[in-house]
Image: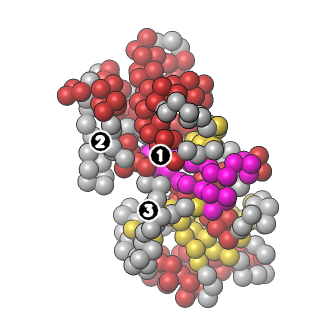
Amino acid sequence: MYYYGLDIGGTKIELAVFNQKLEKLHSERVNTPKEDYHEWIEAVAGLVERADCLFECKGSVGIGIPGFVNRETGLAEITNIRAADNRPIIFDLSQRLDREVRAENDANCFAISEAWAEENQQYPFVLGLILGTGFGGGLVFNGKAHSGHVGMAGELGHIQLNYHALKLLGWDKAPIYECGCGNRACLDTYLSGRGFEMLYRDLKGETLSAKTIIERFYANDATAVSFVQLFIELTAISIGNIITALDPDMIVLGGGLSNFDYLYQALPKALPAHLMRSAVVPVIKKAKYGDSGGVRGAAALFLSR
């Protein structure tokens, strides 16, 4: 049996083929059709059918999407892929490919991939947090994603700043950012690479890339050091709330900012002040599979422990 994982992005669709041990055997990418739904379906189907021919089988098909499929309506909510948004993608792909197709949010797929790593299978509840272009999460219990009632569980980026965060950022002087969801002050616009840069600009008065800010931090630049300490505290406040609500066994960090290794020293030290007395700071790790996590997690939608 072969397991196909597809990572559906706004510009590229990637298919990868895995064996039962989740070892990658093959991958292929194509451009994502932007407007035409039929073309989008055929792009996905073409990848699958070429893999079928190559491996002389009918592999399972799991897909990770930057959104979710509403469990009540069957319609996809993928606002950055217009061709597939508000369409019954699971039904149509299952019909087109003549097999079951499963889909999960791409952050859930990321978390599943990490939860299936051999060294992480000891942790029953893995919380995946992505600090990338935005901030999002995935919840995995015993190797399976928890998607919630309609499929949007884990949309942690749309929790909003709390009292302690606003106090840290200066109360009425705190920068308040509009979020793509239509609300304001969502974590998505703060605990992300984009938010890291915007906060530095608005709090320190200079526009720099995240890479440059981090380089200056490691060079002991006083402005960068003070900013990073503030960002760590903001992150601890926000993730502390999530830990209080969910009490995970392990947290795995992905996305561009997850490569900032100082996070793994500083966060465990900053978190206890924002947790209940009896709480335990979970193990916090950097993602192992990087860009391959999405397809690997999507393939694992058909595996069970």
Mark 2: few, some, or many residues within 10 Å (few <14, many ≥20)? many
Q: Nearer the viewer, residue 241 or 47?
A: 241
Dot 2 falls on a residue whose secondary structure is loop
Task: Mark 1 or mark 2: name the one nearer the start of the chain.
Answer: 2
For the N terminus, which image quadrant?
bottom right
Between the residue at mark 2 and the residue at mark 3, the CA separation in whole angstroms equals 19 Å
Outermost left residue: 172
Between the residue at mark 1 and the residue at mark 3, the CA separation in whole angstroms equals 16 Å
Circle 2 residue: 185
Outermost front residue: 278
Circle 3 residue: 152
Q: Is residue 305 above or below residue 244?
A: below
Q: What amino acid is labelled 2 in the image?
A: Ala
Q: Is residue 156 above or below residue 60?
A: above
User: For the point 79% across and 66% down, which residue is it?
Assistant: 20
Q: What amino acid is labelled 3 in the image?
A: Met
140 relative to 158 in the view: left or right: right
Between the residue at mark 1 and the residue at mark 2, the CA separation in whole angstroms equals 20 Å
Question: For residue 125: magenta?
Answer: yes
183 relative to 106 in the view: left or right: left
| Mark nearer the viewer, 1 or 3 | 1
Q: Give the percent coordinates (x, y) of residue 90.
A: 51, 78
Circle 1 residue: 245
Q: Which residues are magenta?
A: 120-144
User: For the point 30% across and 55% down, which residue is it?
Assistant: 181
Task: Mark 1 or mark 3: name the one nearer the start of the chain.
Answer: 3
